[in-house]
Amino acid sequence: MNSMILKSLGILLVSVVEEFETDTWVTGTVFSLVECGRDICAPLAGPLGRRLSPRAVVMVAGGLVCLGFVTTSVSSNILQVALSLTLLIAIGQCLANVLTRSSLGEHYDVNGFALASGIARTGSSIGLVCLPSLVQLFLNTYGWRGAMLILGSIGAHLALSGALLIPPPKETGNRTTGGYQLLSHTSHKHEAENYVNYSILAFLRYICMKMGGALDLSLMKNLDFWTITLIVVTIRFSQSAWYIYFVPRAVAIGVSNEEATIIVTIAALVQLVSGILGSGLVYTGRGTSTSIMAAGFMTTPEVTTQLSSFLEPSKQRH
């Protein structure tokens, strides 16, 4: 779903720029707000999932994504497009992305989760293989507004995917079926009463502690967490820029939309193969998730450089 949204917006970027007579960088920045909004709202997905259940939240997320595309299709200026993308599509994408991954983690160990994630990622690669040609067809046939409506109907299927989520293992006694012991909440209640009786400042401290526990801020003290965060942010930065700006850049230097679509399809096939290989290595114990991500971290700049050198000579020829 993530790659579908960004890549589709990238293909429609040129038409949106011409419609609203804005600069490419302005519209590209608006489209990138989907990624920014998704990441900023991500810490809220966990508490919502625990309160309302991942199944219900993901189903609502599908409705938000659909509504976001529909409202974008009827926008009359770039500001309305930005609001629709940020407030609807980004939030819906955020909730679905976080809670579907956490649901996988509740049912698999480390190796099984790597394999399940790799299989799930094949959907992203298959989407990149199929969607560019489809979105280009929608654009040529119905215009960018009609294409947005069709993308909204595709995004609505996320609600059906949410309905298929299996609830987490039921609790048995003081332990879950996964073997993790539950924390008692009675001590927190007594602690809250003591804080109230002691002073307002101490009670506010208790509230902050509860909020920190809900958002799981203890991860901030983990070095491995920051290492993985750096890798993911770097890869996402270059990947998102490629999703949004590749087609407009290719068209600007003389490459046809059809040729740009073929290049995107080839890249999607490479992503599909690499995702399967990476998850297989982790599942068989021949590599760790951190080492696989580090390899991608080192490979991404090289691929970007080679792609840039491929496109620059084309500019000179045309």
Image: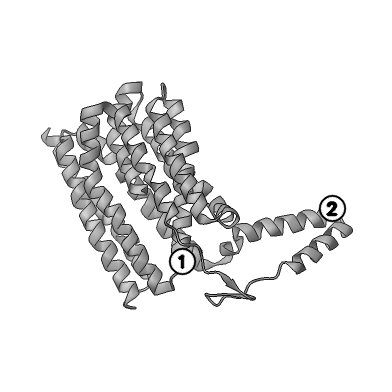
* Residue 282 vs residue 161, the one in the foreground: 161
The residue at 14%/36% (across/down) is 316
Label 1 CA crowd tier, 10 Å (few <14, some 14–19, many 20+): some
Label 2 CA crowd tier, 10 Å (few <14, some 14–19, many 20+): few
In this orientation, does residue 139 appear?
A: yes
Please determine whether, in this image, residue 291 is positioned above or below residue 42: below
The residue at 27%/49% (across/down) is 127
Question: Which colour style is shown?
Answer: one colour
Residue kind at label 2, given as amino acid type = Ile
Residue 77, image x and y in percent? 42, 22
Dividing the picture into quadrants, the one containing residue 292 is: bottom left
Q: Which residue is mark 2?
A: 200
Question: In the rendered view, does 35 fall on the left or right side of 196?
Answer: left
Numbered label attached to residue 234 = none
Q: Which residue is mark 1?
A: 105
Dividing the picture into quadrants, the one containing residue 303 is: bottom left
* Residue 180 vs residue 255, the one in the foreground: 180
Residue 201, image x and y in percent? 82, 54
Question: In the rendered view, does 39 fall on the left or right side of 204?
Answer: left
Q: Provide the secondary structure element on which disc 2 rests.
A: helix
The residue at 40%/48% (across/down) is 158
Question: In the rendered view, does 137 fall on the left or right side of 275?
Answer: left
